[in-house]
Structures are given as C-alpha cells and as structure tokens.
Amino acid sequence: MVITIFLSKMPNSPVPPDAAAQAPGPRDPADLFWSFTWLALQGFGGVVAVVQRELVERKGWLTNEQFVEDWAVAQILPGPNVVNLSVMIGDRHFGLRGALAALAGMLTLPLLVVLALAMGYAQFADHPAVAGALRGMGAVAAGLVAGTGLKLAAALRRHPLGLAPCALLAALTFIAMGLLRLPLFWVLPVLGGAAYALTWRRTAP
C-alpha cells in the first residue's frame, strides 16, 4: 500500500508519442503495480498464457502483434521473460518510475507467496498426493503454453516475412530445441539472426 500511494503522488513523466497513441493504457504507475501484481499471482506454470490474456485480451494494453514483438525481445534479454516484459511496458508508459512500479508488482507479493509455498513444500514434498498434483499441473501448464502459441500464431499472417517463412522458422526452432535438444545459446543466434536478416531485407527501403 505504501508503494502504491508513493507512486500515485509522483508527478507524471512525459509519455512517448507512440505509447500515448495506444489506448487504453495504464492510468498511472499504481495501476501498473497492481496489474502486474495480479498477473504475477496468477502465473503458476504457463505464465505466457496468463500474460497474453491479461495484457492483450482483458486490458488491451497491447495488440497480439505488439505482444509477439515485445515477448520476442523479452526472451532474448537476460532474466525472466515476464519480468523483462513488465519493465519494458512500465518504461514505455511512465519512464523509470513506471518500470520500477511494474517490477515491484511482479516481485513483491509473489515473493512472499513463493517463500510460504517453499516452506510448505519442504514438509510435504515426499507425499504421493503432492507429487501427483505437481505432475498434473505440469501437463496443464504445457497445454496453456501450446494454446497461447496457437492464438499468437494468427499475428504472423501480418508479419513482413509472411506466414509460410514464419512457420518454417518456428518448425526449425521446435526441431532444434524439442527434438535435437540443441542448446539455446546456439539456436537463438542462428535462427534468430536468420529471421532478423530476412525481415530486415523485406522491410529495408
């Protein structure tokens, strides 16, 4: 509560023109804080599904195309993807204090919840019911990620490369990571660099 009051009292910083054109957006840094707190508290397992539903479908802060682009940037940066994304969105709307508000929302209450769950898990980790519940939640998390991937795939139809090249790159990434088990350290620069180069050739004047 103290964090929210402090952020609400601070004067508004100028919003970049491209961010101001996006409507609706967060009302103030306090809105960012509570929105990302609620998002983080839902992020058990398939966090990308929760992020896409909250930011795109419910709040409308991003379009599917914008979410795909921002999520791609968040993935190649060091650190947790959703934390990177929260900092990017906060900074886009309210500068440094927006980034700090979003980051605080992602970490404050979830940290307390994780500590409490960790203490409970340490006592009941060997219980068969707990082990079975975790295996079941793993399957649900995989389904959430797969479902979100299918929804976001529609945004690739408007990608400069076109749907077929994007699908080919996605298939190659799946083969490299999922079947061949190649390390991300090599897959990302090779396939990601190829996607960047092809897109740049299509969009360069």
Image: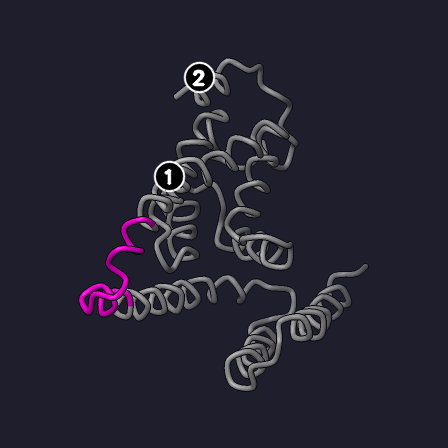
Report the residue at 62% width, 28% height from top: 15
| Of pointers 1 and 2, the one earlier in the residue sequence | 2
Query: Disc 1 versus disc 2: distance between alpha carbons?
Result: 20 Å
- Does 85 appear above or below 137? above
* Residue neighbourhood size for the residue with mark 1, other residues' Cα within 10 Å, grouped as few (<14), some (14–19), many (≥20): few
- Amino acid type shown at disc 2: Ile
Q: Looking at the rendering, which quadrant does residue 18 occupy?
A: top right
* Residue 164, x across and y down, in percent: 57, 78
Q: Name the residue under label 2.
A: 5
Q: Does the magenta stretch include residue 129?
A: yes
Quadrant of the rendered image containing residue 108 = top left
Residues shaded magenta? 119-134
Q: Which residue is drawn at 37% across and 51% down?
A: 43
Give the x, y percent position of residue 28.
Answer: 49, 24
Q: Which of 157 and 108 is in front in this view?
A: 108
Q: Which residue occupies the extreme front position in the image?
A: 123
Q: Name the residue under label 1.
A: 112
Q: Split into 4 quadrants, where in the image is the N terminus?
A: top left
